[in-house]
């Protein structure tokens, strides 16, 4: 099949042609993988010595899963499928804790990633005439540079401002009349809380849209950001192992995220049994690269929990959708024996209009038991209210959380600016039990 650079037809291709295309690319990926020391051994052990061992898509199940630990064990060159001189960039995890993971890209790999990003920003209605302020960190992290080239290719005017320095963000938003931003949801909330303090007003800006990802966030957090800024916000999922941003993005209908299935082969498993999850069931996303040559990854266990939505989308794209990420298998907290995802707590507090733009979940040991404390910032006006009102709010938060997760938390209300600020990914959970 002859697929041109950013072939629009590929977005609405019928499923059976898409599957044929996936099979061709899976076979090619297996032959690239066999060039790496890691997969030569791993696939060899599974009886796969050539791409001819993959005859149909379901043959992918013969391939063992790949994990983050595998990536670490292959550091630095064990997963490189091309001669070093054909590789033009690498992205790596920060390496501050333990061995980093590294993903290499050839120029062709970067062009293909650029294509996916172009498709994603175009899908949400951005293009020529848009002024795009990219507030994600540039560097080893893929959020900044990852969006950059694709947005340029789609014709946007890109301001590569990176994260942090809120005053400068506001100045540029005002002076260049930025229409579109890319930022973590927590940074958007932080920005909002600083507008007045930095001497600006919402009416100084011309913001219309934002793309948000890199961290879990609830539908209620999206709604809050949309109503605070009066914009449309689109969820964008990705991970550095699969390039970075724009693995899956919402279209204008904001009803789950289209995963670009020409580039990523999607499976869903039960993380406990490793069996395939049924349609509509929640499970862990397992993704294989289909078009990346320098670092092919097969059946990568993302640890991210979601649900596949196979229903046709009103936008006409045939690439299936995945639901908002509920959390990671390694995020789940067990508090006094009860399984809790931080997202369940976030959902409750973001629904309450009195609560401000920042929160934190703290867990510690209290004797034999675990103690959960939810700390939230509330608007300054609430603090000037009667202490009885504050107490009533505290109780309401406590009751709502208890009703959702069956655990009664302590609730602390703080004035704005007290809790730690997040310029990149937010760290919302402090679990001190491990230090006891
Ligand atoms: O966070 C890539 C990215 C950058 C995605 C910018 C979107 C926007 P990593 O640092 O490798 O890569 O972290 C990947 O972040 O496995 C998820 O657990 C989480 N994550 C990413 N996007 C979302 C999202 C980038 N939209 C890890 N919703 C993933 C929830 C997300 N979690």
Image (cartoon, rainbow, N blue to C red):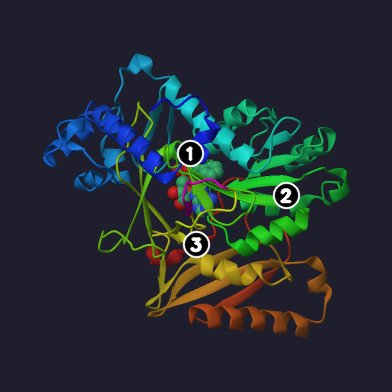
Indicate which disc, 3 or 1, sits on the residue closer to the N terminus: 1
* Residue 387 in the image, given as x and y percentages of width and height: 77, 82
Q: Which residue is mark 3?
A: 430
**Picture disc at residue 244:** 1
Q: Nearer the viewer, residue 33 or 11?
A: 11
Residue 296: image quadrant is: top left
Mark 3 to mark 2 CA distance (whole Å): 23 Å
Q: Which residue is mark 2?
A: 191
Residue 384: image quadrant is: bottom right
Residue at x-position 63% and y-position 31%? 151
**Residue 179 higher or lower than 329, as above or below:** above
**153 falls in the magenta region:** no
Verify CB contact (< 8 Å) between mark 1 and mark 2: no
Tell me if 109 is positioned left or right of 116 in this view: left
Main SS category, magenta section:
loop
Residue range highlighted in magenta = 316-321
The quarter in which the C terminus is drawn is bottom left
**Assess mark 1: CB under 8 A from ligand 1?**
yes
Mark 1 to mark 2 CA distance (whole Å): 24 Å
């Amino acid at each position: 099949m002859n697929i041109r650079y950013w072939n629009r037809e590929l977005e609405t291709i019928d499923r059976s042609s898409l599957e044929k295309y996936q099979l061709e690319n899976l076979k090619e990926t297996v032959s690239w993988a066999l060039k790496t020391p890691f997969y030569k051994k791993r696939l060899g052990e599974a009886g796969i010595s050539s791409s001819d061992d993959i005859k149909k898509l379901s043959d992918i199940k013969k391939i063992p899963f790949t994990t983050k630990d595998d990536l670490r064990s292959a550091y630095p060159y064990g997963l490189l499928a091309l001669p070093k001189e054909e590789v033009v960039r690498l992205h790596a995890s920060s390496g501050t804790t333990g061995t980093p993971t590294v993903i290499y890209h050839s120029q062709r790999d970067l062009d293909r990633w650029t294509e996916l990003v172009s498709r994603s920003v175009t899908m949400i209605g951005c293009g020529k005439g848009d002024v795009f302020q990219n507030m994600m960190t540039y560097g080893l992290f893929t959020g900044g540079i990852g969006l950059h080239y694709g947005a340029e290719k789609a014709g946007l005017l890109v301001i590569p401002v990176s994260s942090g320095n809120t005053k400068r963000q506001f100045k540029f938003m005002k002076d260049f009349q930025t229409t579109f931003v890319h930022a973590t949801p927590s940074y958007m909330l932080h920005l909002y809380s600083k507008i007045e303090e930095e001497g600006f007003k919402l009416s100084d800006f011309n913001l219309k849209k934002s793309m948000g990802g890199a961290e879990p966030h609830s539908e209620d957090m999206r709604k809050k950001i949309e109503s605070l800024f009066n914009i449309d916000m689109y969820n964008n999922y990705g991970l550095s192992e699969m390039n970075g941003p724009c693995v899956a993005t919402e279209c204008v209908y904001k009803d789950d995220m289209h995963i670009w299935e020409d580039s990523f082969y999607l499976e869903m498993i039960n993380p406990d049994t490793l069996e395939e999850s049924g349609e509509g069931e929640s499970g862990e996303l397992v993704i294989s690269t289909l078009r990346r040559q320098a670092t092919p990854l097969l059946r990568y266990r993302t640890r991210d929990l979601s649900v596949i939505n196979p229903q046709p989308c009103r936008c006409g794209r045939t690439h299936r959708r995945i639901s908002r990420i509920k959390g990671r298998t390694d995020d789940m907290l067990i508090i006094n024996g009860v399984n809790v995802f931080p997202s369940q707590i976030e959902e409750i507090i973001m629904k309450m209009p009195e609560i401000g733009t920042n929160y934190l979940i703290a867990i510690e040991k209290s004797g034999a038991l675990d103690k959960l404390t939810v700390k939230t910032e509330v608007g300054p006006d609430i603090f000037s209210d009667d202490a009885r009102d504050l107490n009533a709010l505290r109780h309401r938060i406590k009751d709502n959380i208890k009703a959702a997760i069956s655990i009664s938390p302590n609730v602390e209300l703080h004035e704005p600016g007290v809790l730690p600020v997040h310029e990149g990914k937010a760290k919302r959970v402090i679990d001190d039990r491990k230090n006891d």
